[in-house]
């Protein structure tokens, strides 16, 4: 009624005071008429968006304590002192451990004595990686992990200067005829004059191939028998490439027609063609024998292709590529491959006619020591020649040094396959990606692999993860622990709660636990304090009426029994823990009251 009386007074004073409502409203607002509420809720995606937390979590408890009071004020604008809110939220606590990927540079390999982009075949990477990581990983923390990615050569490796040994554009005038007649560069080494190799004044072309639009071309026939060659500076080591534009109008039963040779008629990289039985072309290659290995791709007649053959003088391997367009880098998979005798000194390019040979036009023949110089007439930088493999070693930072850990598990290709090899499963590409439930896969896998693991057992598991943003496959890891009979991965973001109280002005973080006594608590009091001096009458009254009568209990006794119940029910609480304890009392009428307590100096005192 008091507020109503003030409103009536306000009406009476309206005509006699300048600003009577100001004073009256202030007094009304000051009255004990506060709205008190208790809320328990968890933040939603919309809440995080409103808080401008794009990741949907808080990065620290301190951030939550700083940001939530104003947010609660907006949610509950009329709630005042005594109100509480228990807020559930997501808290980012970080990964179980840090994993970085480090790719070695040329400077790193130089420390091992290699001037190539990779360790030499006789080097032991583990002798150099710890110091390389120490030099390049800044401010590591104890227990950090690094996956060192590096190359190592298999066998010999060297640096070569891209060099074109032969560029033959068949620029021999405007009159067609026999090739050996119009050119002194080409010499018949077999069947001279018998169905001779011809010279045509028209050319073959392919966009971006360097040897085009000059002179004419070479023609050969399935009915001819003359074989010719062109000499160039000898190549005695490494890998040598030969390329030519080629257009076949007919193809026979198959034999070689294009090859490397030396001065003593030793042949290598013999390229042939045959009919596939359906009017299409199959191309093949033989390293040092006339027995060819054919590819499986059917190619068309009367179509210009770029043919590239290679011969590795050091190991005898020959590869064949048939391209429809110019390729800046050597394809990983050849059309056909064959291995024969190594060591042939390459001195000439040969073109052969004979039984089973195609009728064809060749143009733009090039011989070079690198793929790049086959495809370009530009001045090119030196290249590393050699076969190298990619490798990875895992290191951890312990006591100031990088060492290879022993207490970890790295998933193998067999492990990924065991998780499924279908599309969308880890075994498809032997890695995980963002579409897969990584923890589910690994937890299930560990449960099968370690069926007798005990509660609390843990294992650091490392795996490959394809990052769509980085467009790379990276090494990642997590800690897995056996909990309730199953392996669980460490969660970088957890669900937790934070309690707030309204102090009459704002919302403040508050650790108060609200607890209402139950029957067992009153029984505990009677059992514990019945024989304590000074409590007999109070305890007897409690046992008889089931409440704490303020006529029988002093405040000091109430505090003592409440504190004892809290110690019994909530052991191990931290200093400063608060409780709002509701007890059933009789102070003229039986009802509940709530008393606030705080743990200080090992005892609960009224707060």
Image: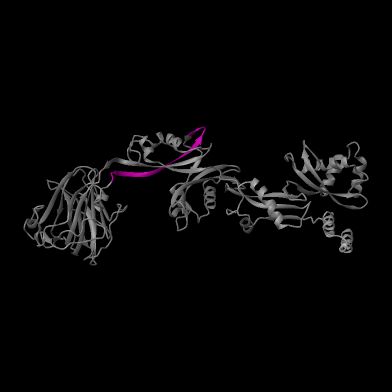
Left or right: 206 in relation to 599: left
- The quarter of the picture where residue 297 lies is bottom left
Q: Is residue 358 visible?
A: no
Left or right: 294 in relation to 133: left
Left or right: 89 in relation to 183: right
Q: Quadrant of the C terminus?
A: top right
Q: Position of residue 220 (x, y in %)?
A: 14, 60
- Decide which of 152, 408 is in the foreground and name it: 152
- The quarter of the picture where residue 56 lies is bottom right
Residue drawn 54% across and 52% down? 440
Q: Is residue 166 visible?
A: yes
Q: How is the image coloured?
A: one colour
- Decide which of 265, 339 is in the foreground and name it: 265
Left or right: 394 in relation to 38: left
Picture mark count: 0
Residue 388 located within the stretch drawn in magenta: yes
Q: Quadrant of the N terminus?
A: bottom right
Q: Position of residue 96 (x, y in %)?
A: 56, 43
Q: Position of residue 497 (x, y in %)?
A: 68, 50
Q: Position of residue 422 (x, y in %)?
A: 45, 58
Residue 592 located within the stretch drawn in magenta: no
Q: Main secondary structure of the magenta part?
A: strand
- Above or below, 406 relative to 350: above
- Decide which of 548, 254 is in the foreground and name it: 548
Magenta range: 381-401
Q: Residue furthest bottom?
A: 278
- The quarter of the picture where residue 606 lies is top right
- Decide which of 582, 141 is in the foreground and name it: 141
């Amino acid at each position: 009624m008091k507020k109503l009386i003030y409103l009536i007074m306000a009406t009476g004073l309206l005509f006699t005071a300048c600003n009577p409502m100001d004073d009256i409203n202030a007094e009304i607002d000051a009255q004990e008429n506060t709205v008190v509420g208790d809320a328990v809720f968890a933040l939603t995606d919309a809440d995080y968006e409103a808080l401008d937390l794009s990741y949907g979590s808080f990065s620290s408890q301190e951030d939550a304590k700083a940001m939530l009071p104003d947010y609660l004020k907006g949610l509950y604008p009329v709630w005042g002192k005594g109100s509480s809110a228990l807020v559930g939220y997501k808290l980012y606590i970080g990964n179980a451990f840090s994993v970085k990927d480090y790719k070695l540079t040329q400077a790193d390999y130089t420390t091992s004595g290699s001037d190539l982009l990779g360790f030499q075949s006789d080097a032991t990477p583990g002798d150099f990686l710890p110091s390389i990581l120490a030099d390049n990983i800044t401010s590591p923390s104890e227990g950090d992990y690094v996956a060192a990615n590096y190359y190592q050569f298999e066998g010999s490796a060297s640096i070569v200067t891209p060099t074109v040994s032969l560029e033959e554009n068949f620029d021999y005038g405007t009159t067609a005829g026999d090739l050996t007649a119009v050119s002194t560069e080409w010499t018949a080494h077999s069947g001279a004059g018998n169905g001779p190799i011809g010279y045509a004044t028209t050319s073959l072309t392919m966009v971006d191939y360097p040897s085009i639009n000059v002179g004419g071309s070479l023609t050969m026939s399935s009915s001819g028998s003359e074989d010719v060659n062109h000499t160039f500076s000898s190549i005695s080591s490494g890998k040598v490439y030969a390329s030519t534009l080629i257009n076949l109008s007919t193809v026979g039963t198959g034999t070689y027609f294009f090859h490397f040779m030396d001065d003593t008629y030793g042949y290598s990289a013999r390229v042939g063609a045959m009919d596939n039985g359906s009017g299409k072309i199959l191309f093949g290659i033989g390293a040092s024998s006339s027995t060819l290995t054919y590819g499986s791709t059917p190619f068309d007649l009367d179509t210009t292709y770029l043919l590239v053959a290679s011969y590795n003088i050091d190991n005898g391997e020959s590869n064949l590529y048939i391209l429809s367009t110019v390729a800046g880098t050597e394809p990983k998979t050849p059309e056909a491959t064959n291995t024969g005798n190594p060591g042939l000194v390459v001195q000439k390019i040969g073109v052969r006619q004979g039984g089973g040979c195609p009728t064809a036009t060749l143009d733009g023949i090039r011989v070079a020591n690198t793929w790049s110089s086959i495809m370009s007439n530009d001045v090119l930088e030196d290249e590393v020649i050699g076969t190298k493999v990619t490798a990875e070693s895992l290191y951890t930072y312990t006591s100031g040094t990088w060492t290879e850990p022993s207490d970890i598990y790295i998933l193998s290709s067999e492990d990924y396959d065991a998780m499924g090899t279908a599309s969308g499963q880890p075994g498809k590409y032997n890695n995980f990606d963002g579409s897969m439930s990584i923890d589910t896969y690994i937890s299930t896998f560990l449960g099968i692999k370690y069926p007798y693991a005990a509660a609390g057992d843990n294992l650091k598991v490392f795996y490959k993860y394809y990052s769509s943003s980085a467009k790379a496959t990276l090494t990642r890891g997590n800690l897995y622990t056996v909990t309730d009979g199953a392996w669980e991965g460490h969660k970088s973001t957890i669900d937790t709660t934070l309690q707030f109280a309204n102090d009459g002005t704002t919302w403040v973080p508050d650790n108060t636990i609200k607890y209402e006594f139950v029957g067992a608590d009153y029984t505990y009091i009677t059992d514990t304090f019945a024989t304590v001096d000074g409590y007999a009458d109070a305890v007897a009254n409690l046992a008889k009426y089931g409440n704490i009568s303020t006529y029988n209990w002093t405040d000091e006794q109430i505090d003592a029994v409440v504190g004892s119940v809290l110690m019994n029910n909530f052991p191990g609480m931290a200093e400063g823990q608060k409780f709002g304890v509701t007890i059933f009392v009789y102070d003229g009428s039986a009802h509940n009251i709530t008393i606030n307590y705080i743990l200080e100096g090992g005892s609960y005192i009224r707060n």
